[in-house]
């Protein structure tokens, strides 16, 4: 089983997928929001044997949910209708800013950053979720 993470924006969806051991997140692709993205994701979930989908929920810094968060919640609900796998909303505060900072530190051009930032943000989101699962499992083992 793998876990997929999605960084959903108004124009694009960044995709990252875990390894089968649920240790590492790998950025995979940035999909355009053109009306076909849900179908592509459903196909991808089946092909990659994804057992869980984590969708980044963009809370504001004060913890409130704004218009973008409502857009993401609607996207997650549509995905839930199409998948047997659970779809989980996960706090993604600052992942895009962190991804942008990382890409700048690597010397990536503005054009390369624009292409990769959403999938890097999805990978950061997924790595956070994987860490949480690992810590929760370790805590329940005590």
Image (cartoon, rainbow, N blue to C red):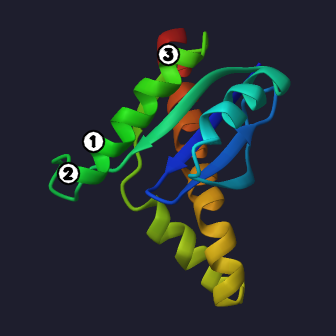
Could you tell me which residue is drawn at 58 percent across and 28 percent down?
53
The picture places residue 141, in percent across and down from the top left corner, at 54, 10
**Residue holding disc 1:** 70
> Mark 2: few, some, or many residues within 10 Å (few <14, many ≥20)?
few
Give the mark, 1 or 3, whose residue is nearer the N terminus: 1
Spatial CA span between label 1 and label 3: 17 Å
Could you tell me which residue is drawn at 18 percent across and 48 percent down?
63
Image mark for residue 66: 2
Vertical comparison of 46 with 56: above or below: above
Image mark for residue 117: none
Q: Give the structural element (helix, strand or loop) at label 1.
A: helix
The picture places residue 80, in percent across and down from the top left corner, at 49, 19
Q: Nearer the viewer, residue 8 or 105?
A: 8
Could you tell me which residue is drawn at 71 percent across and 36 percent down?
40
- Residue 72, quarter of picture: top left
The picture places residue 98, in percent across and down from the top left corner, at 50, 68
> Mark 1: few, some, or many residues within 10 Å (few <14, many ≥20)?
few
Q: How many marks?
A: 3
The picture places residue 117, in percent across and down from the top left corner, at 60, 68
**Residue holding disc 3:** 81
């Amino acid at each position: 089983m793998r876990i997929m993470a999605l960084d959903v924006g108004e124009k694009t969806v960044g995709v990252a997928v875990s390894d089968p051991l649920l240790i590492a997140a790998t950025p995979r692709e940035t999909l355009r929001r053109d009306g076909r993205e849900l179908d592509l994701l459903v196909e991808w979930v089946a092909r990659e044997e994804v057992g869980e989908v984590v969708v980044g929920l963009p809370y504001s810094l004060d913890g409130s949910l704004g218009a973008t968060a409502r857009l993401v919640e609607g996207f997650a609900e549509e995905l839930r209708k199409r998948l047997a796998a659970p779809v989980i909303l996960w706090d993604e505060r600052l992942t895009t800013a962190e991804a942008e900072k990382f890409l700048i530190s690597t010397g990536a051009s503005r054009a390369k950053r624009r292409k990769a930032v959403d999938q890097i943000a999805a990978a950061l989101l997924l790595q956070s979720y994987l860490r949480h699962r690992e810590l929760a499992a370790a805590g329940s083992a005590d």
